[in-house]
Amino acid sequence: MRHLLLAMALATPLTIAETLTVPLGGQGDPALSTPTRGATMSNVAKAFGQPQSIRAGVGDPPITTWQYPQFRVYFEYDKVIHSVKNRTAADA
């Protein structure tokens, strides 16, 4: 019985978790407006202009990334799912 318990203890993988806190509210200029969730690609282009670069859709569903000087916009199909302000040297 003792050998069985020892074998089971050695066979069980050790799980370690760590929590990281990222201060998203401190990124970039707080007054900077970014596209809102659910906006279409055409609405974003009208409101913010053409992006500096476009990363074509990856995955399923396809996630497309538009890069602007001060933020990035992530689209699922043609709808915004998230906008992220770019870090600046002052944020580091």
Image (cartoon, grey):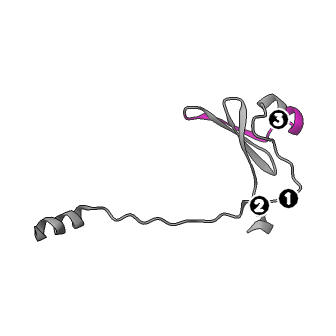
- Looking at the image, which residue is at 23% across and 62% down? 11
Task: Residue 2 in the image: state x and y as whole percent.
Answer: 12, 71
Circle 3 crowding by C-alpha within 10 Å: few under 14, some 14–19, many from 20: some
Position of the C terminus, as image quadrant, is bottom right
Q: Label for residue 30?
A: 1
Q: Earlier in the sequence, mark 1 or mark 3?
A: 1
Task: Residue 86 in the image: state x and y as whole percent.
Answer: 76, 55
Residue matched to label 3: 44
Q: Earlier in the sequence, mark 3 or mark 2?
A: 2
Q: Amino acid at mark 2?
A: Gly
Q: Nearer the viewer, residue 30 or 1?
A: 1
* C-beta proximity under 8 Å, tags 2 and 1: yes
Distance Cα–Cα, label 3 vs label 2 = 22 Å
Range drawn in magenta = 44-59
- Looking at the image, which residue is at 79% across and 45% down? 68
Circle 2 crowding by C-alpha within 10 Å: few under 14, some 14–19, many from 20: few
As displayed, is residue 48 above or below residue 28? above
Q: Nearer the viewer, residue 81 or 92?
A: 81
In this rendering, would 30 be left or right of 80? right
Residue matched to label 2: 25
Asked where in the image residue 79 lies, by quadrant, the reply is: top right
